[in-house]
Amino acid sequence: MTSFARFGVVGGGAWGTALAQLLAADGAPVLLWAREAEVTAAINAEHRNPLFLPGAPLSPSLRATGDLADLAGLDALLVVVPVPYLRAVLADLPTDTAPLIFCSKGMEAGSFAFPVDIARALFPERPLAVLSGPTFAHEVAAGLPTAITLAAADPAIADALARALARPHFRPYASTDMIGAEIGGAVKNILAIACGIVDGAGLGLNARAALISRGFAEMTRFGLARGAQAETLAGLAGLGDLVLTCTSSNSRNFALGQGLGRGESAAVLMRDRRTVAEGAFSAPVIAEAARAGGIDMPITDTVARLVAGETGVAQAIQALLSRPLRREGA
Ligand SMILES: NC(=O)c1ccc[n+]([C@@H]2O[C@H](COP(=O)([O-])OP(=O)(O)OC[C@H]3O[C@@H](n4cnc5c(N)ncnc54)[C@H](O)[C@@H]3O)[C@@H](O)[C@H]2O)c1
Ligand SMILES: O=P(O)(O)OC[C@H](O)CO
């Protein structure tokens, strides 16, 4: 039976640090690569990551490095680099055969590739997996109950990785539907921006519920057209993450939307950010991919135009409300 004991983490942001802490909390050695020297220093010297995960004490068995080569020879790597930066980091990974578990949520501009697509082109023989679901990093780092989807093409690998990552408060549900898990995570970020916009604009909770419901319909149309399984989209990585991220300002995407809804410009909201709101990057990409595939995603398209500064909130909401009536299942 395949087993995984020694994990590495690629990415020292909030989620990479939280996942590393999940695995190191019982004293197990975990090595994390961080891009920033200050993150590496703070983790190694003070057992904390004040830049991206402030207030979360870290296990002394969690060690950090600034050299990707140090991640060679481990049993599996959790890859937690935001999608816009992922390809460059993957290209610098040391040659290895350990599975790569993709934890980022987004579609790459230009290539229309999800993380697994990027990796498959770079590492055609390497086992790949996706870890995605309703998971605020701070809550996972604090040991609060969490469930998540762990998908891999080979069910035996999915089961083995799920067993290896499982903790009393962290429950991975194994799946073979990687594309479904990736689409759920990428689209929910965009819909969270939309829900933040109506919140920031004071348009009420009915509007939020309508966006979650109709946004889930968009996610499903897009996902099924690209080979996702309906139960994945209706599960933790899709609907589960949609509910979490569309209902809390703990979500960076929802919070970005709140700013847009209050009338702040995307340029100002995105300028000088250290943390990512991946939906802002993915919205134009998925909107274009949907158009190219003849898939109707009006909310996604509206968020893309708002983030690009091509329309205002009032006009965007009016345009959505004045769309022709249609049957719900259509
Ligand atoms: N934060 C969460 O609660 C959470 C939970 C689940 C999934 N995710 C996903 O995890 C991924 C990582 O997000 P995060 O929240 O950990 O990041 P973050 O917002 O905490 O930090 C930003 C990260 O981007 C990295 N970065 C910035 N510029 C870069 C560059 N040019 N090259 C390489 N890396 C660069 C930084 O080093 C840092 O690690 C995203 O896809 C996100 O959607 C986040
Ligand atoms: O802060 P967000 O919007 O990137 O959401 C974090 C996680 O994806 C929640 O599952």
Image (cartoon, grey):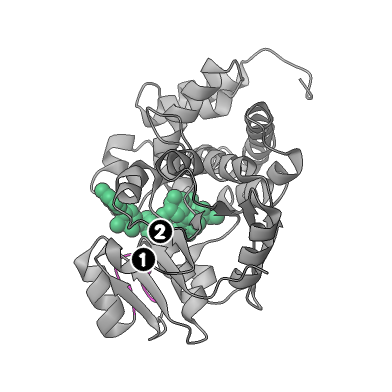
Which residue carries the number 2 mark? 96
User: SS at mark 2?
Assistant: loop
188 to 3, vertically: above or below: above
Residue name at image x 51 percent, y 58 percent: 99
Residue 16 screen position, x and y as percent:
42, 63
Q: Nearer the viewer, residue 258 or 174?
A: 174
Give the crowd class for mark 2: few <14, some 14-19, many >=20 residues within 10 Å: some
Number of dots carrying numbers: 2
Choose top left, top right, bottom left or bottom right for residue 40: bottom left
Whether residue 245 is in magenta: the answer is no
116 to 321, vertically: above or below: below
**How far apart are labels 2 and 1 at the CA level?**
6 Å
Q: Nearer the viewer, residue 125 or 4?
A: 125
Magenta segment boundaries in residue numbering: 48-55
Residue name at image x 48 percent, y 74 percent: 6
Q: Report if residue 265 is visible in the image.
A: no
Q: In this image, 301 relative to 179: left or right?
A: left
Residue name at image x 31 percent, y 50 percent: 89
Q: Nearer the viewer, residue 284 or 264?
A: 284
Disc 2 within 8 angstroms of ligand 1 (CB): no
Q: Report if residue 267 is visible in the image.
A: yes
Whether pointer 2 and pointer 1 mark residues with C-beta atoms closer than 8 Å, the reply is yes
Q: Identity of the amino acid at label 2?
A: Asp
Which residue carries the number 1 mark? 72
Q: Identity of the amino acid at label 1?
A: Ala
Disc 1 within 8 angstroms of ligand 1 (CB): no
